[in-house]
Amino acid sequence: MKIFVIHRFKNRHNVKKNLNSLAKELSLRINFFFLTSANDEWKHKAKKAILSSEMVIIYDTMACNESPNSKWEIDFAKSKKKKIIEINDYG
């Protein structure tokens, strides 16, 4: 299963650790897409990855809504009617 992960870069280590633990616990084979929006090509890569993904995970929705790049990815995924799952450390 291909899953695009929208997250804040500052949380990347915890995001990867928590999602990989969850996949292992549930015995799932998942290919997670993690992008860095630090270069000019991120939007093109995000579009391509979101379109090829079966679903999108938004990790820490409140933090993602503070980032224009993460917000753009969320809006794009919604516009393409992707299945979206929100995961938050705070419940």
Image (cartoon, rainbow, N blue to C red):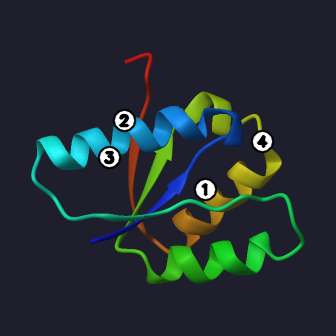
The span from disc 1 to disc 3 (Cα, nearest Å) is 21 Å
Q: Could you say whether the residue bearing mark 1 is in a helix, strand or loop?
A: helix
Location of residue 9 in the rendering, given as x and y in whole percent from the top left corner: 69, 42
Give amino acid for label 3. Asn
Q: Which residue is mark 2?
A: 18
Q: Which residue is mark 4?
A: 67
The span from disc 2 to disc 4 (Cα, nearest Å) is 21 Å
Check if mark 3's residue and mark 2's residue have beta carbons within 8 Å. yes
The span from disc 1 to disc 2 (Cα, nearest Å) is 20 Å
Location of the N terminus by quadrant is bottom left
Q: Which residue is mark 3?
A: 20
Q: Could you say whether the residue bearing mark 2 is in a helix, strand or loop?
A: helix
| Disc 3 packing (10 Å; few <14; some 14–19; many ≥20) | some
Location of residue 22 in the rendering, given as x and y in whole percent from the top left corner: 24, 41
Among numbered discs 2 and 4, the one appearing first in the sequence: 2
**Observer-nearest residue: 87 or 75?**
87
| Left or right position of 62 against 67 | left
Q: Could you say whether the residue bearing mark 3 is in a helix, strand or loop?
A: helix
Q: Is residue 84 above or below residue 63?
A: below
* Residue at image point 37% right, 35% down: 18
| Left or right position of 35 against 24 | right
Residue 74 is marked as 1
- Farthest left residue? 27
Location of residue 3 in the rendering, given as x and y in whole percent from the top left corner: 39, 65
